Amino acid sequence: MKGYSLFSKRLGRYKAYVLGVVASIVIVDLIGLLPPWVLGDGIDYVRKGGGDVRTFGLFAFCFVAIEVCRACMRFTWRRIAWDFSRKVELDLRNEFFAKSVKLPPAFFDGTTIGDLMSRATSDIDQVRMFFGMGLLTLFDTTTIVVTTLPILIWLNPRLTLYTTLPLPFLAVICWRIFIETHRRSRAVQEQMGDVTARVVENLNGIRVVKAYATEEIEIERFEDLSNVQVSLSLRLARIQAVFFPVFTIVLETGTLLVLWIGGSSVVRGDLTVGDFVRYTLYLGWLTGPMVGLGWTLSLYQRGIASIERLNEILLRPDPVDGASAPAATGDIEFRDLTFCFGEGRPNALEHVSFTVRAGTKVAIVGRTGSGKTTLVQLLTRLYDAPRGSIFLGGRDVRDIPAAELRKLVAFVPQDGFLFSDTLAENIGFSMETVDRAAVEAAAKAACLEEAITTFPEGYDQIVGERGVTLSGGQKQRACLARAFAADAPILILDDAFSSVDAETEDKVVANVREQGKGRTVFVISHRLSSIMDADQIVVLDKGKVVATGSHEELLKKAGVYADLWRKQQLQESLR
Amino acid sequence: MGLTHTAFMEEDVKKGFDPRLARRFFAYVLRYKGLLWSATILLFFFRISAIAAPWITKVAVDRYMNHPELPLDERLAGIHWLVLAFLGVMFVKIVTNYAETLTTQMLGQRVMHDMRMSVFRHLQTLSLSFFSRNPVGRLMTRVTSDVSALNEMLTSGVVALAGDLVTLLAAIGIMLHYDWRLTLVSFAVVPPMMLGTRIFRRVSRQIYRITRAKIARLAAYLSENLAGMKVVQLFRRERENSRRFGEYGRDLYNTHLRATLYSAIFFPFVDVMRATAVALIFWYGGYRTHQGHVTLGTLIAFISLVELSFQPLRELAEKYNILQSAMAAAEKIFGILDEKPEVLDAAQTEALPDVKGDVSFESVSFAYDAGNDVLHDISFRAKPGEMVALVGPTGSGKTSIVNLLCRFWDVRQGSVLVDGHDVRKVAQRDLRKRIAIVLQDVFLFTGTVAENIAMGDRTMPRERIEAAARAVHADGFIRSLPGGYDARVSERGSTFSAGQRQLIAFARAMAADPRIIILDEATSNIDTETEILIQDAMRTLLAGRTSVVIAHRLSTIHRADRIVVLHHGKIVEQGKHADLVAAKGMYARLHELQFEEAEAAPAAK
Ligand SMILES: Nc1ncnc2c1ncn2[C@@H]1O[C@H](COP(=O)(O)OP(=O)(O)O)[C@@H](O)[C@H]1O
Ligand SMILES: Nc1ncnc2c1ncn2[C@@H]1O[C@H](COP(=O)(O)OP(=O)(O)O)[C@@H](O)[C@H]1O
Ligand SMILES: [Mg+2]
Ligand SMILES: [Mg+2]
């Protein structure tokens, strides 16, 4: 029972809560035993011909007073139990987040945001439900059975035998129904996730859909999904529809037996009418919890399944990190680096070796898919290169804690991701508290200032999900500004000007030159004219270094680079 | 801190019950009259049979249990008959309950499917201007959760409410029938109940809305962080973002606690009210029984009936909230359905047979927002097979021209002609089937590479897909993927390099076999070599087809048959590369700039 120990370990953390829940629920149930008693006595009193209004009043008063006490206790346990379950939820969610920020990009490549979100929401919900309602119902049921059953037996043992016999079956049946219900509703939810994903994709890609006039195909695909959704939902409805009838059968069979056997007993004089009423009420007490028991069982099972799904994330080992020692910048060396993204894929990089002196500028050129992005991602340990293949200041980057390493790097990723926050927050992303002056300086250096002045909110403009409200060029420049603001000794620009128009690009490139002084700069670009001033140019092809050297050296070598250069020159100068 | 403002501020439609919306919604329901009637009838019988049990018990007590003067046999036989009656009622109850739940669900699901499809279908007809105004997140909820809210109203709101009404009326009817005085006494708790419910409804509705907004904020923050995890890690924001996430979570937790405070008060309150009603009945009823006005069985039945009528009252507040959110959802859904596409097909569309690819703009002026022209008096022509390049600084209107050619928007003045047909006179579908467009921001759909190239067209033969990929030099890298053309494309194609994504988009355009092809900064992430290869391939393959190319790198476009230079939405010059360079205008300057830098840089060292 792996799941069980997972549960009990978590339970142990919230001892005080659990005690509170148990105590209050037991009290509520004990008080709950009184009203049927009072009512039964009252009815017998009436039947025997009692007519004192004050006695009636006393009965009524007791009845209400008891109920008020019970209500107070109910209030207490609801508070404790819900507080408890929300606490569990909060803690789990925070753990989930704390874990996911530690997981490497490779992990995210292999999963979808939808799947992770479903773990963080519905699975955590399941666990919360168990810790809240589940535990509560469990204790509730136990107390009620333990207290009510003796009373029933004491009132009428034979009747009790007949009427309580079906109850355990009720519990089992309910449990099965709940489990099945859950299984089916999970399928419905997953399908709903697919439907949602389809809609989102359709809307995100609506321009493409319209451009290719594939609306009909989209509608057809969506209709298929929606139809599946309908049939899955009906499958769920069929099992849900069974529940109340089953519940009714068991409950009413009990009442039926009471009416039959109990009624006959009353007729024969073995039972008073008051006892009869009392009995009916107590029996009613017992049925609810039996359903509850089935429910708890199913909650428990679901909770375990969910905890296991959560643990696939939470118990994932942290990526091995270097010993925590401050890192300093220095020469960067790639030593026979070979890297592959996973089984069945070709090597993204093969036997890459070259050295970058601290404070120099290196350019990486190569065709699409030749491994340029991969190379700089390995340097920043977004993906981990094999040990002994990348060194910074003589230390293997694998021995440097990722956080320390990244402190030294300002990175402009190829596909700029911005958060739906203000521009200032986005540009000052690397700062603990956003320093407005630094942000503005960075924006200026990235030639973004002019654009910002046109925004109604200026630096406080919210950029929308993934920065949708910005143009491609503005987005790239915002990412550039973000890197400038990080003010790190190593600057990496991965095709950072591709969406910037030529005029602006010149200004930006000049600013980068300025900013890059005294820093180690990695530039990836397709426009050779913007990188030819690099101290060193590395030419990649299919993951291999085919040439290194300065612009002039490479031109002399008459290889791929010279070829490329000639082509671009030709194009540029063609009359 | 300003996370997803738009996403969670919009939840605010403060409307009560709107009969007009309700009528429109019920038009959908009335499509399934059979189901609707069956559900109603079944519901009626189910609720009536549920009321019968206390009544049978009453008869048993009054007629037989509490009547010592009758002969024992007769009393026992009476009990047995009642047991049989009870069994019958129980049977009816079970069967009707099962059938009613199923029919209601069927009805709900059918209606939901219909609504989902209408919204989705309608969205597909709307113009791009609509989508540029409405964020995806918001539109998505229209198709998903808003439709579900309506379904919920149908299955657990309206139907249950009708059922509760049946129960209440029947219970009150029976009670009145036996003793109206006692009934009135038990009604004494109704005013405080109503008051309590009202208050609870108000506070819970408000807190419910706040809770929803906070849940949405938390979820948005989480999913955004998951999506941008690389950036979070690169800039070492792990701790700070965890702290913020924890803060949002703590905030939600506090809201939850406040919400539970209200229901923790309300439900016990209802219990006390119920107990009070029972106590009142007992007090006054006991007295009346003693006086001989009321039988003991009636007294017992009253107690059961009061308990029975309290169940619906307990849930009334919740039902009301369901109704409210359904109304809000209906308003938003019908709001979308009422959106008229801004670009409409003409009533009489001209057929567009074999398109040759003759594109011309004739004095076109255009504005996204009225009174703010972004294109002024644009005229140019591309003859079949020609390549036209659009050049100009960002914001000069290049993409806007493309938008007009595809008729994503309509011109304000002038006309856009394809083979002499005004694009406003042909069906949008016919027009766009002849045009393929490749954008800078490539959008890949989840699915396989082949599906992406075929744009979901399952009938497209594999050879055509592969030929298209070969033509744009994407075949090599696709084959190296695990699964080749059937390799899975992850969300947004994250496992491809940016250039590879563009190559797939090129293949997509090729596979569409268009007469006119548009490249809007489509080569920005592709290296020069591959770009040249693609261009060559396109030129041979698109012989006799027209292309419109936008690029920042002038090298990409120097061989165009015509270069159109734009500035602030006006054409400042057009002509061939050589002519434009010779003319020493704006193009020549742009060209100089790129060229000079290439020359100057080595000298600077
Ligand atoms: N996350 C990833 N998972 C699997 N394969 C990847 C991933 N990222 C890149 N690749 C593959 O690695 C190769 C090199 O990609 P990349 O470094 O992005 O090229 P580029 O030189 O264009 O930047 C490509 O074939 C690409 O498909
Ligand atoms: N959907 C839109 N709604 C309103 N204005 C827009 C929209 N798209 C572009 N614009 C505006 O129209 C002008 C021309 O933009 P665009 O055609 O995209 O330029 P380009 O493609 O040359 O960079 C810009 O000022 C831009 O802000
Ligand atoms: Mg790359
Ligand atoms: Mg544009």
Image (tube, rainbow, N blue to C red):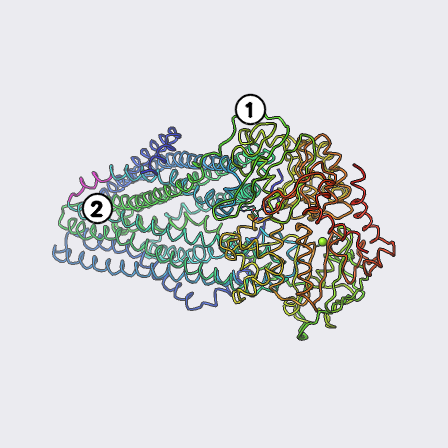
Taking the image as drawn, is residue B592 in sight?
Answer: yes
Do the residues under discs 2 and 1 have CB atoms within 8 angstroms?
no
Q: Which residue is mark 2?
A: A164
Kind of element beneath mark 2: helix
Place of residue B374 in the rendered image (x, y in percent of width and height, measured from the top left) = 77, 56
Place of residue A281 in the rendered image (x, y in percent of width and height, measured from the top left) = 26, 45
| Quadrant where the N terminus of chain B is found in the figure | top right
Q: Earlier in the sequence, mark 2 or mark 1?
A: 2
Disc 2 packing (10 Å; few <14; some 14–19; many ≥20): some
> Which residue type carries mark 2?
Thr
Place of residue B265 in the rendered image (x, y in percent of width and height, measured from the top left) = 43, 38
Question: Relative to the observer, which residue lies in front, A396 or A182?
Answer: A396
Q: Which residues are the magenta region?
A: A147-157
Residue B587 vs A83, above or below: the answer is: below
| Quadrant where the C terminus of chain B is found in the figure | top right
Asked whether residue B398 is drawn in magenta, I would say no
Taking the image as drawn, is residue B218 in sight?
Answer: no
Question: Relative to the observer, which residue lies in front, A245 or A190?
Answer: A190
